[in-house]
Image (cartoon, helix red, strand yellow):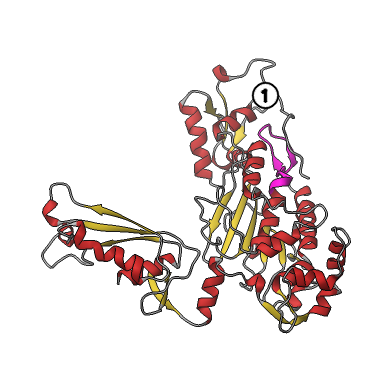
Amino acid sequence: MVEKIAACLANADGGEFAVGVEPKTPKGGTPIDRWAGFASIEDGNFIQQSLVNLVSPSVPYSIDWLEIDGEEHRGLVALVGIYKSVQVHRTSRSEVWARRGAQCLQVTGHAITDLTLSKGTASYEDQVLDRYSREELANEPELAFLLGAISPKTDPQSFVRKQRLLDREHEHATVAAAVLFAEEPPTVIPKKCAVKVARYETSDPVPTRDHLRGTPATHEGPARQVINSTLEEVRTILESLTIMEPDGTFAPARYPPEALKEIIVNAVIHRDYNISDDILISVFDNRVEVRSPGKLPGHITIENILDERFSRNPTIVRLLNRFPDPPNKDIGEGLNTVFAKMLEAKLSKPKIVVERDAVTVVLGHTPVARPQEIVLEYLDTHAEITNRVGRQICNISSESVMHKVFTSLAATGRLERVPGKAGNKAAWRRTAGSMPEVGEQNAEVSEGQTSLF
């Protein structure tokens, strides 16, 4: 059982389990009676032996020995920590198990291949496409563009062979070749692999179809061209999007261009092409969401994503970097750049959401300043403020949360309710003692601000 649970967790995202605790409370007993520990650490040696000798390859693990203060007679319980692994682990019976929800389910057949690809042990970019021949690849305009810019000069046939973009037996091209050079990749890759850009006219966390403006634009083609056309599409949408500033004026939404570019580039080059789904970029009134198919690759987790580096598609990353003015620098600084540029623009740090088969990065147009500071800055140049305006400038969706901001300022004597206004017309104003002196109003700071693109 230990080896099965350990392999199951290592084949998923890791986790913990305890050895020495009964699954149910004994009849007539208490929860503490579930504690059925070992008399000594040596009695639990079989746990480590199972992790090292029975699971193949052995799993990355840690073991902590626990006991209850004052209840030493109940023995020691082993808390086993299993870490996410880049390998596929099997039990001594050559079975593959993986965690799905709260269950350990056996994985067989093609599902093992999919598990291997999702963990980064192998990459779908190396899969051979029977309907994409060497001749078709060698005649792609995008390949000619690349070869015309690199040195030393080489012919297409030699280049694709040297770069391992063909299988040796039949000389069919790989998925990586199609992503990089095919004029219409979805016609040769048996999976969805385009980029869709949608505009939702709402700030709601969960939009409805009624919020969707027009038909989402679809971008297909070689990776470099898709990145460029997608960036242009998002830029066009954002130019028409205005945000209320803390001083009450309206201005174009200023998302750092470097941050937007890095997020879109990462989505294209690091997505899991084994999953038949398109990248979805959703532009909301207060945020941009980029959803990329596939889990975090290899050993990458939310906790180490800014410090570690692991490429699911190393061939795509490497060859895209050889184009003139490449969209990717291939130095592992992508997300670090995103976080740094958002901070420079005085916006909150990006949010990364990991789903079962996708990773979504959210760039919110949320000021770093506290809501109380933003409200007071607004009232430096305005007589009063309503809940609706407060939510706009603070990027807060809840009326009750915004109301608490106002009441917290009122509790310190800085705000008061505007007499005679109630219900949806209720408003707040500065108290007489908190009014700024003449010339003390906050000036707009232009230094360090980032334009849209």
Compared to residue 198, the image places residue 273 above or below, namely: below
Is residue 256 located in the magenta-colored stretch of the structure?
yes
Q: Residue 167: x and y, percent?
A: 71, 78
Which quadrant is home to the C terminus? Answer: top right
The residue positioned 66% from the left and 59% from the top of the image is 267
Number of on-image labels: 1
Crowding at dot 1, Cα within 10 Å, few <14 / some 14-19 / many 20+, comes out as few
Q: Residue 68: x and y, percent?
A: 18, 50
Whether residue 152 is visible: yes
Compared to residue 232, the image places residue 342 above or below, namely: above
Compared to residue 105, the image places residue 253 above or below, namely: above
Residue situated in front as seen by the camera: 51 or 179: 51
Compared to residue 261, the image places residue 267 above or below, namely: below
Residue situated in front as seen by the camera: 333 or 435: 333
Q: Which residues are magenta?
A: 242-259
Q: Indicate the quadrant where residue 5 lies.
A: bottom left
Is residue 446 located in the magenta-colored stretch of the structure?
no
Q: Residue 403: x and y, percent?
A: 51, 38
**Amino acid beneath label 1:** Asn
Residue situated in front as seen by the camera: 273 or 444: 273
Q: Residue 192: x and y, percent?
A: 68, 73
The residue positioned 66% from the left and 18% from the top of the image is 440
The residue positioned 42% from the left and 59% from the top of the image is 83
